[in-house]
Amino acid sequence: MKRAPEFRPRILALLPLVCTAALALAMAMALAMALPVRAADPGARKTFEKTLPFTPDRDIAVGIRTGEVTIESARIRNWPSADDFEKARRDPSDKSTAVVEFTYTNRDRDSDWKCLYLVTVPGTGALLGENDRTATLDRGKVHDTNKIFVKMRTADFKVARTFKVRFEIWRK
């Protein structure tokens, strides 16, 4: 009677390869399932900082992009008039409010995003003005604006050279 060929050693030799392939497949599936959850994580914040020139009524390029959101530019509106500066010369405590207008685009058609704007106007030794605001970056909007108001002494408008902005942007 003939004996059947022994297949057991061949199968045992392939066992580590089969286990490694199964483990790799399981890890790939787990990673694939976890990635969409991380991509849609509403709490993931990105922080950016920019120093921009403090000049009246001129578009200033910002150029920040995260995900589908772009902060394109900033513009300082409501610059004090010559009469306001004359009043400030007579009364050094006179204050004016600048409007810093940020232009953004949110190409995400499914989600609004949020942005915390922190604007500071540095001076020599002290801040000349500061304010912050959290605003919505509406889904699907192109070249829309958000505004933040910064109150400071009118005379300091002529002294300030730059303003700093910290942006914290996240999906809502």
Image (cartoon, helix red, strand yellow):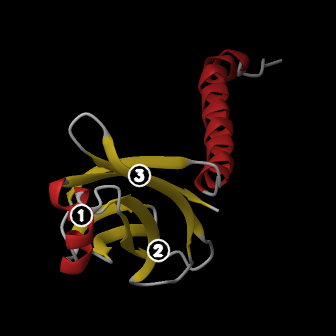
Residue on which disc 1 sits: 90
Q: Closest to the observer: 153 or 118?
A: 153
Q: Mark 2 points at which residue?
A: 146
Relative to 95, residue 28 above or below: above
Crowding near the residue tagged with mark 1, few <14, some 14–19, many ≥20 C-alpha atoms within 10 Å: few
Q: How many marks?
A: 3
Q: Are marks 2 and 3 in contact (CB under 8 Å)?
A: no
Residue depth check, mark 1 versus mark 3: number of the one nearer the observer: 1
Q: Check the image and name the residue furthest to the front.
A: 90
Q: What residue type is labelled 1?
A: Arg
- Which of discs 1 and 2 lies nearer the camera? The answer is 1
Q: Is residue 56 visible?
A: yes
Residue highlighted by disc 3: 130
Tell me which residue sits at (18%, 78%) in the image: 82
Foreground mark, 2 or 3, reads 3
Nearer the N terminus, badge 1 or badge 2? 1
83 relative position to 131: left or right: left
The spot of residue 6 in percent (x, y) is 72, 18
| Corner quadrant of residue 152 | bottom left
Lateral position of residue 66 relative to residue 26, left or right: left
Instruction: Determine whether the residue tagged by mark 3 lies in a helix, strand or loop.
Output: strand
